[in-house]
Amino acid sequence: MPDPITPCSRKRCRGKEYSCNMELALGVIGGKWKPLILWYLRDVATMRFSALRRAMPAITQKMLTQQLRELESDGLLTRTVFAEVPPRVEYALTDLGRGIIPILEALCRFGREFEARFGIEDAAAAAGPAATAEPATAR
């Protein structure tokens, strides 16, 4: 039987305050966008900002920039700026960033299992008839 959970004192690591390592890990990779950014970088040597933005059409440019900066600051990815016109910026996973990929793969498997158990519906149909109706044309 596992040991009972005992409260831990608050600690700080790289500006993140936490009580347990799970809280720290979620502080580093938690949120809606960071896991997706890491996921899209998993199979490529580098990826440009615009390619990441295309891969996640719902993210704003400001939010993507913020999330990339945080992941870089936490050592999960590198940012390389090329002195070209127009400037080219590429992102790549670090060894630390690659270490999270097996966990993200497990989350992806969970998503597939959840989908298989509860089914899928068309997102446009779920939004209601107004979202799927074709726009009226002027006659």
Image: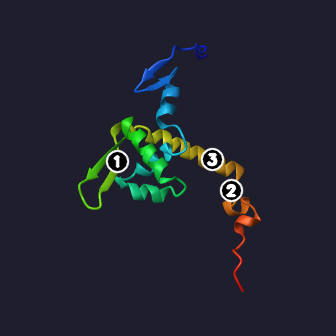
Tell me: residue 4, above or below residue 39: above
Quadrant in which residue 124 is drawn: bottom right
What amino acid type is highlighted by mark number 2?
Answer: Ile
**Residue sitting nearer the eye, 51 or 119:** 51
**Residue sitting nearer the eye, 78 or 108:** 78
At x 65% / y 50%, what residue is drawn? Answer: 115
At x 70% / y 58%, what residue is drawn? Answer: 121
Numbered disc 3: secondary structure: helix
Mark with earlier residue (1, 2): 1
Numbered disc 1: secondary structure: strand
Measured in 3D between alpha carbons, the distance from the residue under mark 2 to the one under mark 3, in whole angstroms, is 12 Å
Quadrant in which residue 69 is drawn: top left
- Could you say where residue 67 lies in the image, as x and y percent from the top left? 45, 43
**Is residue 40 rendered to the left or right of residue 135?**
left
Tell me: residue 32, above or below residue 120: above
At x 41% / y 58%, what residue is drawn? Answer: 51
What amino acid type is highlighted by mark number 3?
Answer: Glu
Q: Decide: marks 1, 2 in contact (CB < 8 A)?
A: no
At x 40% / y 27%, what residue is drawn? Answer: 14
In front: mark 3 or mark 1?
Answer: 1
Numbered disc 2: secondary structure: loop
- Provide the residue designation for mark 3: 113
- Provide the residue designation for mark 2: 120
Mark with earlier residue (3, 1): 1
Mark with earlier residue (2, 3): 3
**Is residue 59 rendered to the left or right of residue 51?**
right
What amino acid type is highlighted by mark number 1?
Answer: Ala
Measured in 3D between alpha carbons, the distance from the residue under mark 1 to the one under mark 2, in whole angstroms, is 33 Å
Question: What colour scheme governs how the chains and residues are painted in the rendered image of this protein?
Answer: rainbow
- Provide the residue designation for mark 1: 92
In front: mark 2 or mark 3?
Answer: 2
- Could you say where residue 19 lies in the image, as x and y percent from the top left? 52, 20
